[in-house]
Amino acid sequence: MSKRTKKQAFTNIEVLDAGAKGKTIAKAPDGKVIFLSNTVPGDVVDVQTFKARKAYYEAKATTFHKLSNKRTTPVCEHFGVCGGCKWQDMGYEHQLFYKQKEVTNNLTRIGHIELPEITPILGSANQYFYRNKMEFSFSDSRWLTLEEVQSDADLGDRNALGFHIPGMWDKILDIKKCHLQADPSNAIRNAVKQFGLDNKFEFFNTRNQTGFLRTMMIRTSSTGDVMVVIQFFKEDKAKRILLLDFLAETFPQITSLQYIINGKANDTIYDQDVICYKGEDHIFEEMEGLKFKINAKSFYQTNSNQAFELYKITRDFAGLKGDELVYDLYTGTGTIAQFVAKQAKKVIGVEAVPDAITAAKENAQLNNINNVEFFVGDMKHVFNSEFITAHGQPDVIITDPPRDGMHKDVVQQILNIAPKKIVYVSCNSATQARDLELMDAMYKVTKTQAVDMFPQTFHVENVVLLEKR
């Protein structure tokens, strides 16, 4: 065995911190950092390494000598196997502390940014049942626990409806109760699984590409709408109608019941026809009097209540007085653009996904907003000097890029335009910090506000206001 992969054991190691991607951090006797995934800061543990690099180890705690006072009892029976809520064993106030710390560290260490007084992170009022969208997968070869593997008992059928095991593309953890989406989500999922078993429907096998039931998506909204989309691997009209009728009759609160026949190798739906079986082909989300029409393929922030808080902070940072031209970059379905429009002279939204721009225009019309315009194109190509000449010099730029942050050409174009203010919304403070450093000579960070959109996870959003020096 090479020195690089040689396993080592360390005893009585104190867990010191929580870092990026939800890993906790300790120090080995040789001075190297140890990254752990099954501890909480304050635990004292024995660890077994499974990966060694020049500056760090990756390891797992094998024995707990002392449990941290930051711990709390996980509410979910699937915690530790399901990868969805990695921080459920840490008290919520401590989750917020480490999220805030990560954002601050990224801005100062990666971006070398001089920060104003830090506004405390905004926690989520709902720490469970906050998601408005969940996607579940069917499988005929469910993940077995270690106890089941070692048991001599008859395990019965191996069918599952739940989540992919982290790192296991072909294994699904059967979920009995998920604490991420409110009712009727759990009831619908469990009823569909039982109906499939009772009627001997084939659950999907990813390796062999066989089966009938493939995936299920459930979307809920603050208006009370419920959307269910069943993805079948192949058409079997009799079975399909049997299941869809069962769903419609058992759960009359479903306002949008749809299905997809997808026989391709992957289960992404963006290139698939979504067929409306009963009700509407969309649901509505509402925010401060604005209505947003959401179809099966639409992107919408998955924590509706906290998205409202995020958008209010964004609008507050922009400080609009009514006479400004605002550019909303990476506008998506134009939610932020429409949210700030009533306080601006005009808002221009730019987005690379054509379907998102179509939805943005439709929602603007639905909301009778006449001072917004939306354009589709790759940001680094469409957002150029010709675009500025055609649509005007913005007073404020709002940018909400994907996790990778902004392309350096987009950053340079913002610097060329030199608006008075930039509001940068980010779901990845590391790439946000990188971009802020590129703008630091011209812009000063005057406000920063972290927002917790995803309790029980390590993910965190951050909003920054930049003003010209």
Image (spheres, grey):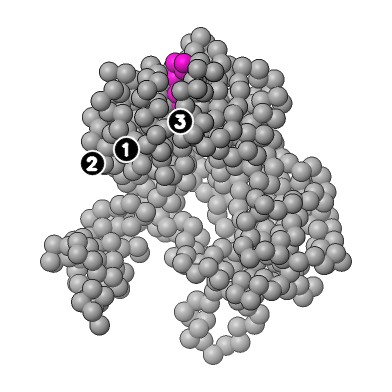
Q: Was residue 103 drawn as part of the magenta stretch in this picture?
A: no
Instruction: Specify whether 26 is left or right of 146.
Output: left
Residue 291 visible in rendering: no
Between discs 3 and 1, the one toward the N terminus:
3
Picture disc at residue 433: 1
Residue 85 visible in rendering: yes
Task: Tell which residue pokes out farthest to the bottom in this image.
Answer: 152
Q: Nearer the viewer, mark 2 or mark 3?
A: 3
Dot 3, how many residues are within 10 Å of its Cα: few (below 14), some (14-19), or many (20+)?
many
Residue under pointer 2 = 109
Picture disc at residue 204: none
Q: Compared to 210, does 92 lie above or below?
A: above
Q: Which residues are magenta?
A: 393-398
Residue under pointer 3 = 399
The quarter in which the C terminus is drawn is top left
Between discs 2 and 3, the one toward the N terminus:
2
Q: Quadrant of residue 350?
A: top right
Q: Amino acid at mark 1?
A: Ala
User: Pointers 3 and 1 in contact (CB under 8 A)?
Assistant: no
Q: Residue at x 37, y 48 (%)?
A: 95
Task: Tell which residue pokes out farthest to the front in this image.
Answer: 386
User: Pointers 2 and 1 in contact (CB under 8 A)?
Assistant: yes
